[in-house]
């Protein structure tokens, strides 16, 4: 357990652990159609536009092989073990269930329980693929890319020293959560309720990212979305 908690926070291990989520999402797109494409997924859009269907499959195959090679190398160094995947899913399921229950309770009290009309018409498989894409790509963009990048920018703006990163990181967490919430309104009308509960969800994902790393944030986001989209039918 100590090795699991220590090493799953490390980015190389977290990326390897995210491979099943990548496979679920990419295989799911092929199965249910590209209408389930996540808005933050510029990778797949670029691949399909420039290389077509065959190139999309080849590149994804190479990416998966690369991650499997990384898993093998990390395993040889005793920094990764495949058995960590099950406790990872269990840990993230606990976080997701707690978040999901709280969010559904608030939505119900606000008489906003239930998905939008477009989501309501989607199959269960499509909802799962959408959730996988959100967990993977939104965490890549809004947590893995934005938080460190914005923290560095805020540190330079504030003239913070290297050992005084609390304020820059805090500002980056809040700013990335606001952007995470606002990004959803590119495809739907703005409402203050949706803005606040997505912003709060973003803060939770950011806290998990900071405390437990990318893989935990990604799988928690995925399972949280599955919980909300399935139970709020």
Image: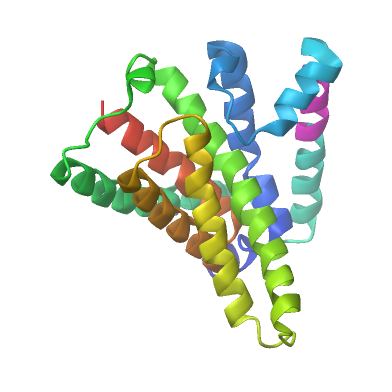
Residue 189, above or below 16: above
Our reading of the magenta stretch's main secondary structure is helix
Q: In the visual, does 152 lie left or right of 28? A: right
What is the total number of numbered labels drawn onto the structure image?
A: 0
151 or 144: which is nearer to us? 151
x, y (%) of residue 129?
51, 25
In the image, residue 32 sits, relative to residue 43, either above or below, namely above
Looking at the image, which residue is at 55% across and 16% down?
A: 35
Magenta stretch bounds = 56-64
User: Would you identify the image quadrant in which residue 144 lies?
Assistant: bottom right
- Tell me: residue 17, above or below residue 33: below
> Residue 159: where, in percent of width, then height?
74, 85
Q: Quadrant of residue 20?
A: top right
The residue under the point 24% across, 43% down is: 104
Does residue 25 appear in this view? yes
**x and y, in percent, of residue 22 in the image:** 63, 34
Q: Nearer the viewer, residue 159 or 18?
A: 159
- Horizontally, is 182 left or right of 44 in the view? left
Percent x, y of residue 195: 39, 48
Magenta span includes 115: no
Q: Nearer the viewer, residue 107 or 89?
A: 107
Quadrant in which the C terminus is drawn? top left
Q: Is residue 156 left or right of residue 208?
A: right
Note whether residue 5 is visible.
no
Q: Residue at x 70, y 58 (%)?
A: 11
Placement of 214 over or under 187, stated as above or below: below
Q: Is residue 62 magenta?
A: yes
Q: How is the image coloured?
A: rainbow
- The residue shown at (61%, 73%) is 169
The front one of 66 and 139 is 139
């Amino acid at each position: 357990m100590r090795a699991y908690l220590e090493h799953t926070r490390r980015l190389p291990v977290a990326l390897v652990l995210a491979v099943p989520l990548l496979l679920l999402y990419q295989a799911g797109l092929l199965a249910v159609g590209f209408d389930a494409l996540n808005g933050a997924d510029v990778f797949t859009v670029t691949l399909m536009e420039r290389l077509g269907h065959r190139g999309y499959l080849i590149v994804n195959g190479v990416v998966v092989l690369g991650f499997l090679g990384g898993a093998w190398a990390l395993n040889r160094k005793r920094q990764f073990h495949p058995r960590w995947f099950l406790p990872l899913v269990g840990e993230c399921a606990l976080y997701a269930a707690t978040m999901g229950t709280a969010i559904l309770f608030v939505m119900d009290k606000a008489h906003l329980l239930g998905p939008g009309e477009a989501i309501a018409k989607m199959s269960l498989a499509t909802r799962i693929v959408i959730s996988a894409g959100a967990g993977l790509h939104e965490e890549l963009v809004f947590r893995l890319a934005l938080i460190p990048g914005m923290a560095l920018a805020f540190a330079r703006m504030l003239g913070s020293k290297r050992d005084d990163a609390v304020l820059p990181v805090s500002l980056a967490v809040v700013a990335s959560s606001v952007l995470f919430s606002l990004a959803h309104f590119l495809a739907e009308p703005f409402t203050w309720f949706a803005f606040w509960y997505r912003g709060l969800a973003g803060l939770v994902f950011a806290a998990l990212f900071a405390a437990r790393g990318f893989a935990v944030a990604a799988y928690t986001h995925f399972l949280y979305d599955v919980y909300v989209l399935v139970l709020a039918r």
